[in-house]
Amino acid sequence: MAEGFVVARLWRAGLSWLRNVPVADEVDRRNAPTLQVVLLMLALLPPPMWLYRVFFNPLPWRDSETPSLFASLGMSLLAALCVALIRQGRVKLALRLLLGTVAVLLMHAYFIQGMASNSYEQPLQVAWLVVAGLMVSRRALWLMFGWIVAAFAVGTIVDGGKASTPDSWDQLTLFAVVCALVFLFVAVVVDRSMVALRESLAAARARGDELAQAKTRLEAEIVERERLYNQLVHSQKVEAVGRLAAGVAHDFNHLLTLVLGYAARGMAADGEEPMRAALAGVESAARRASAVSRKLTNFSHRGDAMPETFDVNAALAEMQPMLHQLFGPDVRIAFEPAPAAQDIRMDRSEFELVVLNLAANANTAMPDGGRFVVTVLPQTASRVALSFSDSGRGMDEAVRRRVFEPFFTTSADGQGSGLGLAVVGEIVSVCGGSLDVDSAPGRGTTFHIALPLAGAARDTAGEMPRAVNA
């Protein structure tokens, strides 16, 4: 167990070291770990292999092996240098230096040994061709291909000088042409693959930029919509207060006039009975003033309501685009309609106001995204049930009990008027419906609304409407 844990930690540390390269280009950053592994193998493996060959191999040393020894050790030093360049973030320079050295050694090998003697190394030469194409550029790919074909030509000439018959020369030329065609096929495949990969990457980057710009525009639009919405709520609040003030101003002026008149009569009265009558008038006026003051807590201004009969399913379906605009991109919206039409009778604009206020409340409760579900179900033969559920932060019991109070809000200053849910409760109540809420911290919130069906509106007219201030 301990050994396995140590090995795992060493493996993770090695991967982290290979990936920790200061490279800005994404393709180079992804290629850097693999390239470092290959270069480290080139730097570390040949020296011990030649050491074994020199001191422990019983076969005699051949003079032809001396150039190979120096070339191999030079390649190891170059690989180590390339690793150091990659650790500094200079991946392209390391690759060009490596491929340039490989090209020089390749030409030298074909010039000294000929085409036939280097045929067994051609699979490795294909690997360098792939590295040039995938890790550097198309230009490097075709330069390497041209250099390899030139090396084939040089090696064929060298072997041709040793050929004893014209047939041997023809066979050498045919072999070189076939090898060149094979490398051409590999180069074309690598070129097309590289172009496709880089075009896909460019398209993905462009798409990412477009999405980022679209997100920025959407965020700006949402901010603007919220600003306009807040202005609208504020104007509605001012209008409601203005209507209430205008409605009670005349009554209070009239009642104050009565109070002052009764007070003056009582002060001028000579007997007990006129004084009692004056005080009774003052008391009556005061009671009427108290009744007028209670109007300040009412938000009903339904004199211009226009009831109509409509299907709840259809109305909510038509509002789906509006809801998608209201919520952010991180909120998933689901709509579960009833199996059959559910006709109700009320002002449709007020019904939409109820839905939008509940949706706006859910949106505020889910700043990091979540799920908003609207469900319609037949409750009884005369009523339909609607539920609006969110997966937001939820409310504790103290907030839940006050959620329908006018001007009560848990939002920061300037971010909520406290009228939305109060308006919802008033609309539902006047329509003969009922409203309740289930919520708990961390478990989201569900508003339950029951509305009378259009055919049963007359039967429920006599019931006591309620808005449950749960």
Image: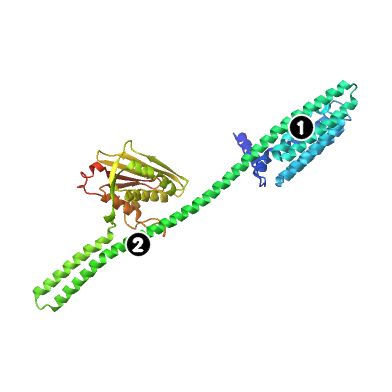
Residue 313, labelled with which disc?
none
The Cα–Cα distance between marks 1 and 2, rounded to whole angstroms, is: 82 Å
> Could you say which is closer to the camera, residue 124 or residue 426?
426
Tell me which amino acid carries mark 1.
Answer: Gln
Residue 187 lies left or right of residue 268; in this view the side is right
The residue where tag 2 is placed is 238
- Does dot 2 land on a helix, a strand or a loop? helix
**Relative vertical location of residue 205 with respect to residue 301 in this rendering, above or below:** above
Q: Position of residue 100 (x, y in %)?
A: 79, 40
Which residue corresponds to the image point at 26% horizontal and 51% vertical from the top-left?
Answer: 430
The residue where tag 1 is placed is 125
**Residue 3 image-quadrant placement:** top right
Of circles 1 and 2, the one toward us is 2
Q: Earlier in the sequence, mark 1 or mark 2?
A: 1
Q: Residues within 10 Å of mark 1 (few under 14, many from 20)?
A: some
**Relative vertical location of residue 422 with respect to residue 179 in this rendering, above or below:** below
Q: Position of residue 338 (x, y in %)?
A: 33, 38
Whether residue 61 is visible here, answered yes or no, is: no
Whether residue 236 is visible here, answered yes or no, is: yes
Q: Position of residue 150 (x, y in %)?
A: 82, 34
Q: Position of residue 251 (x, y in %)?
A: 23, 66
> Could you say which is closer to the camera, residue 454 or residue 383?
454
